[in-house]
Image (spheres, helix red, strand yellow):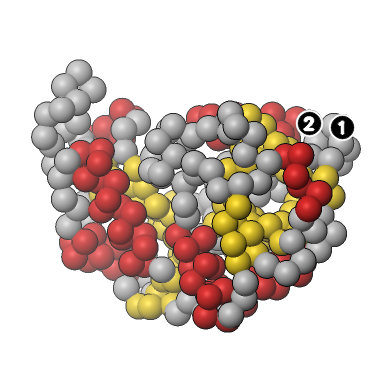
Amino acid sequence: MDGQARTGGADTACDVGTGAGAAVTVLFCNGQLADAGALSAALVNYGHFTSLQVRAGAVQGWALHLQRLQVSTRELFDVELDGTQLVAWLRQALQQLDAADASVRITVFSRQFDFRQPLRTVPVDVLIAVAAPASIPVLARSVLPLPYQRELAHIKHVGTFPLFHLRRQALQRGFDDALFVDAQGRISEGTTWNLAFWDGAQVCWPQASALRGCTERLLMEGLTQLGQAQTHVEVHLPSLSRFSGAAAFNASGIWPLAAIGEQHLEQSDVLLAHLQAALAQAPWLAL
């Protein structure tokens, strides 16, 4: 497929969302508009984050996002993240911008972290980025399998350079994005998204070391509520022909995959419908 036109058009990397003013982002650090000092500290590139969508002041799966942030804070900094304070800062940021609908990224880092003394206990800081609400167009995309395993895959850390470099490689070869394959040949995840497969009867979740997304958890719970069969399997590239469909997803939406490499997937829209119904089971809860 190298050299063919990308499925979604010229600028369709799989997490490009839509929304007026999406390029305008306002940053808050610990409840205050971020200044140069806070931003320069973030350049140390040691921290973690979560991304989410807010609609009418509500979020799907907020408990999962908070759990992710608190668990990763313990692992990276050996301190506790105050969930009550975090929610207060998030509400304050949205209210200050009069933003009932928004795209939000919450990053936990420390202005006092010193890479020369990484074991020193330091307080953490919270950087909240608020932008216009975004949603990914439901367009079928084609992705290129590439060998890669994220470091500390279970943490949504700020070390994103390899993800975007591999995305560039996929785009240069005529695909919409990159799909990661580990050293054992197992499909794990995409650059900024998880995925599921469809075998004609059940939803199949690929098993390999990967960042397990909040949206993935919500989809699994929703499918269970709907009584839809699902299973966890190792998916190797040579076995892709057993699947008739695949779909990708993150906090900004769900979209079908038209092809993985040379393997075309004719029933991805069937899987898409199942996943959309599953996500609809997750309530939007006020912050």
Furthest-top residue in view?
116
* Near-viewer residue (269 or 122): 269
Residue 273 percent across, percent down from the top left: 70, 73
Instruction: Name which of mark 2 and mark 1 comes first in the sequence.
Output: 1
Q: Which residue is mark 1?
A: 3
The secondary structure type at the circle numbered 2 is loop
- The reply to whether callout 2 and callout 1 are in contact (CB within 8 Å) is yes
Decide if residue 273 is on the left or right side of residue 70. right
Q: Is residue 106 above or below residue 178?
A: below
**Image quadrant of residue 231?**
bottom right
* Label 2 CA crowd tier, 10 Å (few <14, some 14–19, many 20+): some
Q: Which mark is residue 55?
A: none
C-alpha distance separating marks 2 and 1: 6 Å
Q: Quadrant of the N terminus?
A: top right
Decide if residue 287 is on the left or right side of residue 19. left
* Near-viewer residue (255 or 168): 255
Residue 209 percent across, percent down from the top left: 49, 41
Q: How many marks?
A: 2
Q: Which residue is mark 2?
A: 173
Decide if residue 47 is on the left or right side of residue 145. left
Q: Quadrant of the C terminus?
A: bottom left
Amino acid on which the number 1 mark rests in the picture: Gly
Residue 168 can be seen in this image: no
* Near-viewer residue (75 or 242): 242
Furthest-left residue in view?
121
